[in-house]
């Protein structure tokens, strides 16, 4: 029964936090500088998730060797993204290089 109260409590807290933003969305406007700063949140969060996964694939130590398929795939994907500006091409080439390198080295 305690688990039910816990789940219900988490649902209520999550709903209140998210709904409160909808309530004030039309009545309150952020300053231009804050809106500009908020534009950097998604890249910062993505970087915080991806960089440790690429540099520490085993979760123990940083692996900067050529045998790290995660690092090779990420570098190739970054170069493709920078040159082509095509998201689908970046994903496909990055995954092909990652799996190919993993198969070749592993």
Image (tube, rainbow, N blue to C red):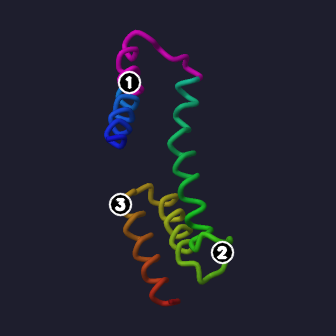
Q: Which residue is mark 2?
A: 63
Q: Tell me, for residue 16, which label it has, or none.
A: 1
Instruction: Give the label, 2 or 3, closer to the camera.
Output: 2
Vertical comparison of 11 with 61: above or below: above
Residue 104 against residue 59 in the figure, above or below: below
Name the dominant secondary structure of the magenta segment. helix
Q: Which mark is residue 47?
A: none
Q: Residue at x 45, y 87 (%)?
A: 103
- Identified at 54% across, 55% down, the residue is 49
Q: Nearer the viewer, residue 94 or 50?
A: 50
**Separation of disc 2 and disc 3 at Cα?**
27 Å
Give percent across and percent down for residue 96. Answer: 40, 76
Q: Is 24 included in the stretch rendered in magenta?
A: yes
> In the picture shown, does residue 85 fall above or below 25?
below
- The stretch in magenta equals 17-33
- Residue placed most toward the observer, 36 or 24: 24
Q: Nearer the viewer, residue 101 or 51?
A: 51
Q: Position of residue 89 (x, y in %)?
A: 38, 64
Residue wearing tag 3: 88
Q: Position of residue 99 (x, y in %)?
A: 42, 79
Q: Badge 3: few (under 14), some or many (20 or more) residues near its Cα, within 10 Å? A: few
Q: Residue at x 58, y 30 (%)?
A: 37
Q: Is residue 6 magenta?
A: no
């Amino acid at each position: 029964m305690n688990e039910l109260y816990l789940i219900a409590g988490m649902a209520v807290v999550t709903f209140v936090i998210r709904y409160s933003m909808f309530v004030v969305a039309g009545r309150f406007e952020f300053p231009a500088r804050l809106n500009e700063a908020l534009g950097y949140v998604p890249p910062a969060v993505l970087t915080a998730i991806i960089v440790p996964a690429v540099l520490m694939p085993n979760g123990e130590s940083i692996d900067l060797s050529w045998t790290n398929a995660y690092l090779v795939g990420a570098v190739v994907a970054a170069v493709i993204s920078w040159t082509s500006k095509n998201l689908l091409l970046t994903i496909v080439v990055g995954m092909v290089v990652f799996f190919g390198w993993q198969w070749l080295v592993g």
